[in-house]
Image (spheres, rainbow, N blue to C red):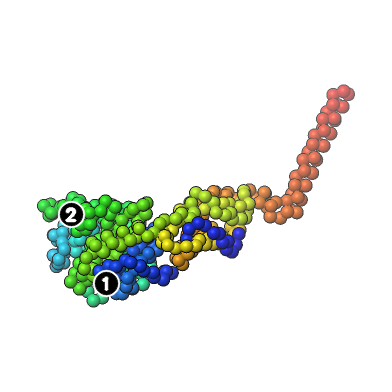
Amino acid sequence: MNGFRKLLVPLAVAIPFISCALDVSAKSAVVMDARTGKILWAKDDETLRYPASTTKIMTALLLLEHCEPNDVIVAPADVLKVKESSMHLKPGERVTAHDMLYALMLRSANDGCYAVAVHIAGSVEAFSRMMNERARKIGCTHTHFDNPNGLNDALHYTTAHDLALIAREAMKLPDFQNAVHTYRYRISRSIDQHDCTMVNHNKWLTKDTTADGIKTGYTVPAGHCFVGSATRNGYRVITVVMHSDHWQKDHQDMLHWAYATHTRVPILNHAEAVDTVKVAGGTKAAVSVVPVTDVDSLLDKSVTGRPQTSISLKGPIAAPVEKGQVVGEVTVTDPDGFVQVIPLAAADNVPRATNLVAKAGKTGTSGILIGGVLFAGTMFVRARTRRSRRYGTQLFRA
């Protein structure tokens, strides 16, 4: 099936901004639905600001994407030059990538970030290029990283919106989730074995049982920054505050507002077929298609109207078709204008038909001719067999 099919479902790139009675001290702030990336509320979210140690979210993301947990990171010979927040690495000290993740996200170790950058890319400059490339792939449009730790630098900046996008990407990784949700962790290290306990700078973890993390940050030019996360009512919300006078109160107020004013509405189930697509040359003429994941949306309770869902399918697709093979997409548009595009996949395997059957199905007349030839051959063999039997009987009688 080609083209678009529109469906109405009971529900509902960026949406225009709404705001209400939510007021925060931060100069820039964002509330984002972690599942879809939908911005629920924002204040000056595209203004360039210094991110301070919230930078380490990107550093940790690259660490997880480029290292195995047991990889050993060796502190560079000049590691002592890195100042401020530190895990007190010694030159040549060895720490696994797994433990370094906790040092970065709990202790906010600037020297650990430097060691990670050199281990992965060979230099801070090369690692910064990796950070910027990864940010672009995530969808960040106003971000430029110049170091892996967030120490103040005129060429090191981002926005509240971009920072939320980076945090959302990192929170897709279970190892990252586990680290930022941990308040205290003991690492192993080869030299400084008296400084092994990493305690999280995020004190909000001890005040809110729904808190998931993520990262604090502070420098004088940046002010207090915080990227937070909480899961309530079965869904996660990410908050960002930059240059805040009261980051904990801002974060708390944003969470309370988000969960009080929004509700999650299911749209599609990944186990339920939404359509079929034709298959050419297969053992079946068509296959059911399903979303690759459950589809839902977080809607403001005051929003009225029903969202529209449009399905676009490739087709016919050539056999063999593998279960899970992407064969189209579904576009969901909320009443407030937010758009999601989700791939659609084949629900079953469809093997290629045998050559004879496939040719017969394709050629029609040729199939009939082949069948006729086979039938005539069969009749000829049977007639010859009958004649042989009669001739043998006559000889016996003689």
Going by the numbered disc 1, the residue's amino acid type is: Lys
Residue at 76% from the left image edge and 50% from the top image edge:
369
On the rendered structure, is 24 left or right of 279? left
The mark nearer the N terminus, 1 or 2, is: 1
Q: What element carries label 1?
A: loop
* Residue in view at x 59 percent, y 50 percent: 352
Q: Label 1 belongs to which residue?
A: 27
Can residue 116 be seen in the rendering of this structure?
no
Q: Say what amino acid the circle numbered 2 marks.
A: Met
Front-lying residue, 349 or 21? 21
Residue 198 numbered tag: 2
Q: In this view, does 350 lie above or below 311?
A: above
Asked which secondary structure carries label 2, the reply is: strand
- Give me the residue at 23% from left, 68% from top: 244
Residue at the (18%, 50%) spot, across then down: 186
What is the x, y in percent for residue 180?
Answer: 26, 55
